[in-house]
Image: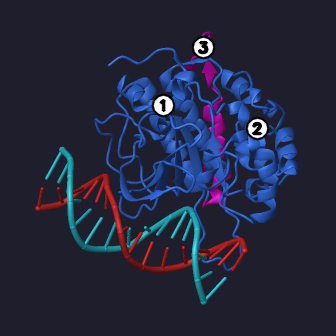
Chain colours: A blue, B red, C cyan
Amino acid sequence: MERKEGVKVEDVLGNSSCSVNDFPLQSIFDLSSNEEEKIRSLGFMDLLGVQDLISSPLLEIMAAQQVPSRMATQPPNAFSSTKIGPPHEVFNQPATPNSSTISSASSEAVHDEPAKLDDQEEDQRKTKKQCPILKLIWIRNQGFDFHQSDLKLIMKIIFCCFGVCGFRLKPKKTNQKRQREPRFAFMTKSEVDHLEDGYRWRKYGQKAVKNSPFPRSYYRCTTISCNVKKRVERCFSDPSIVVTTYEGQHTHPSPVMPRPNLVGSHLNSAISAASFGMSMQTTPSHYHQHFQQPFTDNLSPLNFGHNGSLNATFLHQKRFCTPGPGPGPSLLKDHGLLQDILPSHMLKEE
DNA sequence: CGATTTTGACCGGCGC
DNA sequence: GCGCCGGTCAAAATCG
């Protein structure tokens, strides 16, 4: 099976009517104007805790998203040392569950027109008190050529970073009965609703979504004692886009391991890193000791080819951690987390 | 036959 | 208190 070369971002996202341009930083992270200003000054990659991508095309893409590329001026652990405080203080802003913004934690967000977000966002900010944090990742369609594996890698990095940053939900009330796990949403251009991501899921529910012709599916990780869930639904404004929202942390390694080649091994490391980063959300004291530094160290060698393809030379062969006493690598193909953002047909082409 | 999906019922949070 | 809505349960159906 040949690796697909020169996969464009637009192949993944397509010519969506939901242009990423429609979703400014604020809409992505659901920030108030003040927070957005802080984020702008800090830099997107600062927020991610990634400092070594200054010259990367990926950064250019992100920068084009009104995200300043000043991460090189910030210390690697800017998150923990910066004046803006810990991430959860930045991101735990009143969200807009019924908002027209795409960043809203509740799924209705993706069903409305992004252009209407300003007014409605303001209104909803007044009416909505708080909702779980959600991180929406969106790779801009720049016509930039990525290898398919590069795209996977990039998204793994991003997911990993969000995990590392340890965004936590701030309890709505001190005696809140139910506290949600951090949630991460991915928007995927795909004809397939449920995309392979390396984990095994069992569907436990499906609900009709208000103001949307598309139902929302609920999945739970089939691994015993792993309470990770995910929701899958289609964007109302663009049915070709699938929004996958993850909630919780896997307590086990991905049951699907990569094939034994270079890229696969890197992706495998990334999976581990992502998994580890997620676990760090609950163990912040270990974050600096065991994860952040290894992460940035391993990210440093990241480089891009002259044609813009991302060489998967970062994330050393070594694993950042051993997520558990799981079985050794299987012969199964890597369908890691990032494959949630890739159409299944692309995955099959690998 | 076990695993998975389907689907209506049920529950809890929230706004009015 | 009531209704709406998101999320979950669980029995039945389906799949491999």
Residue A268 position (above or below residue A277): above
* Residue, disc 2: A24
Can I make out residue A77 in this image?
no
Q: Nearer the viewer, mark 3 or mark 1?
A: 3
Which of A150 and A295 lies nearest the eye of the viewer? A150
The answer to whether marks 3 and 1 mark residues whose Cβ atoms lie closer than 8 Å is no
> At 38% across and 27% down in the image, what residue appears?
A345
Q: Identify which amino acid the numbered label 1 is placed on.
A: His
Is residue A53 shown left or right of residue A37? left
Task: Determine which quarter of the picture holds residue A18.
Answer: top right
Spot occupied by residue A93 in the image (x, y as percentages of width and height): 77, 58
Observer-nearest residue: A53 or A68?
Answer: A68
**Residue displayed at 82% across by 54% down:** A122
Q: Mark 3 sits on what residue? A: A305
Q: Are the residues flagged by discs 1 and 2 from a single subunit?
A: yes
Q: Which residue occupies 60% across, 57% down?
A: A182
Question: Is residue A284 among the parts visible in the rendering?
Answer: yes
Which is more toward the observer, A146 or A14?
Answer: A14
Please check the rendered image and state whether residue A294 is part of the magenta-colored stretch, yes or no: yes
Task: Tell me the distance, in whole angstroms, between the alpha carbons under discs 3 and 2.
Answer: 29 Å
Q: Which residue is mark 1?
A: A266
Name the secondary structure under disc 2: loop
